[in-house]
Image (cartoon, helix red, strand yellow):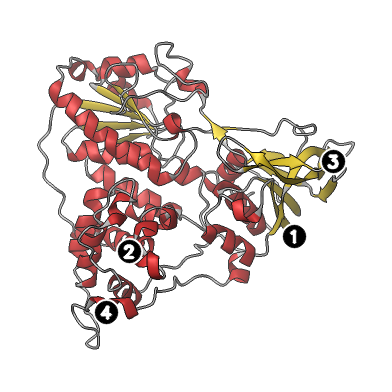
Amino acid sequence: MIAKSPDTPSKPTPKQRMLIERQHMPEQDAQARAANFGEVNLGLTEQLALLEADRCLQCKVPKCVNGCPVKVNIPQFIKHLSEGDLPGAAKCLLRDNVLPSVTGRVCPQESQCESECLRAHKGLSVAIGYLERFVGDWAREHSGDQTPNEVTPSGKTVAIVGSGPGGLAAAGGLAASGHDVTVFEALHKAGGVLIYGIPEFRLPKKIVEAEVRRLEKAGVKIVCNTIIGRTYTLQELQGQFDAVFLANGAGLPIFMNIPGENLKGVYSANEYLTRVNLMAAHEFPNSDTPVLRGKHVAIVGGGNVAMDAARTAKRLGAESSTIVYRRSKEELPAREEEAHHAREEGLQFEFLAAPVQVLGNEEKWVTGLKCVRMQAGEPDESGRARPVAIPGSEFVIPCDTVVTAIGSRANPLLTSTCPDLQLNKWGNIIVDENGMTSLPGVFAGGDIVRGAATVILAMGDGKRAAKAMDDYLRNTETESGSIRNNIMASLCDVNL
């Protein structure tokens, strides 16, 4: 329990709640943080969290819940918090969200739950994300005080491919229903994009590792260094488990297909961020993986991944780190908080500019990025004005490193080995309304289904799939659970 200030009413009236201003998240100083990988947002204090919780109007029809892809009971956990009942708030939050410390940091609440908040119509919404982070962190730090829920084993086994947000959300839901869950991860650490894609300064690795440990304590088994499609086939998983959930993401980078893209000093954002985040390249030579520490870095793209790469380059010592985006500032798809932090940290932006060539020297090293100015044209299929090149407007951004962050698509490593698995024209897996693929008992969700999207949307898919898989397992006679010894025995030889 948290003791509230004696000056604060235990139950503020709606009028009193409306008078409380939204609390600001404490941050590292911009100049200092641009030179380190420490977390930028420092979290609310207990006093600030209680004050922010008191801003919630406890609506009878909470539209904020409908704006949440995993349907967290937002008013209820905030009510517990406002009353100083942290155990109750944590229990309520964890019942709906298996990764609250993660989503409280990286979920775009401003365009989801917070955009539906009643207070947003006449001012600033309740800082739901800040409160989710506060309660999630409290739950993580007091995990030893929490009693695990008793579950009755179902006798059914489930394999999950991929330990990213979708896979972990599904694992948590299925384990809570009593199923025996094994998660297979291709890389040497669990967490997927949470570990290799999102920088330390936005999402510390210790947070992800702690959330994974919580799932392991709930009975989820994590098997790393295992590539489904190579180490084992999907057909083998089908023969050894009662159901399978595919959440292997969309990690194949998209390139610009312009001259000079094969020069030395050109990275995809996937490789660049993976080297730094998962392989600690920023600590080279103390770590085994190097990465170029460019003095002048150009990052192509305008999403959160582009911001992550540009801000990482700054922390690696870049004198200039420039975002090159073909649309206008108003159309920038990155979260406003990320763009704001990037500007504070000294990043430059070249809006309405598109690369046409990467320039290099005789040794094949990057020397610049040739771009053309763009202007708004006719609307495209999305309704946005299509960027059109302005003839004769070419210019060069001097740089020694170029990072492309223009999206990713489905990696065919797994799907190419499964001819009966139906895919769409982009290589994404087709599923029905329950998340089941064309293969009975095989479900899928997250980026491998919807294309590159957000952490919370992948988690929503995982949570919905867990419910559908539970129904499937309880209503379908399966035979594979008793004969899965081949794979599980061979896991003794896998570096877990």
Q: Residue at x 85, y 47 (%)?
A: 395
- Residue 106, horizontal then vertical, whole percent: 44, 53
Query: Mark 3 — residue?
Result: 391
CB atoms of marks 2 and 3 within 8 Å: no
- Residue 123, horizontal then vertical, whole percent: 41, 70
Give me the disc on residue 464.
Answer: none
Q: Answer with mark 3 or mark 1, whichever residue precedes in sequence.
A: 1
Crowding at dot 1, Cα within 10 Å, few <14 / some 14-19 / many 20+, comes out as: some
Crowding at dot 2, Cα within 10 Å, few <14 / some 14-19 / many 20+, comes out as: many
Query: Mark 2 — residue?
Result: 118
- 27, above or below 200, in the image: below
Quote the CA–CA distance across marks 3 and 1: 31 Å
Q: Residue furthest front?
A: 378
Quote the CA–CA distance across marks 2 and 1: 44 Å
Q: How many labels does the image show?
A: 4
- Residue 394, horizontal then vertical, whole percent: 85, 44
Secondary structure under the numbered disc 1 in the rendered image: loop
Q: Name which quarter of the figure residue 360 lies in.
A: top right
Query: Mark 4 — residue?
Result: 15
In terms of depth relative to the viewer, which is nearer, 140 or 259? 259
Q: Answer with mark 2 or mark 4, whichever residue precedes in sequence.
A: 4
The answer to whether any part of residue 206 appears in the image is: yes
Asked if residue 305 lies left or right of residue 461, the reply is right
- Name which residue type carries label 2: Leu
Mark in front: 3 vs 1: 3
Query: Mark 1 — residue?
Result: 319
- Residue 487, horizontal then vertical, whole percent: 31, 20
Secondary structure under the numbered disc 4 in the rendered image: helix
Crowding at dot 3, Cα within 10 Å, few <14 / some 14-19 / many 20+, comes out as: few
- Name which residue type carries label 3: Pro
Secondary structure under the numbered disc 2 in the rendered image: helix
Q: Name which quarter of the figure residue 461 lies in.
A: top left
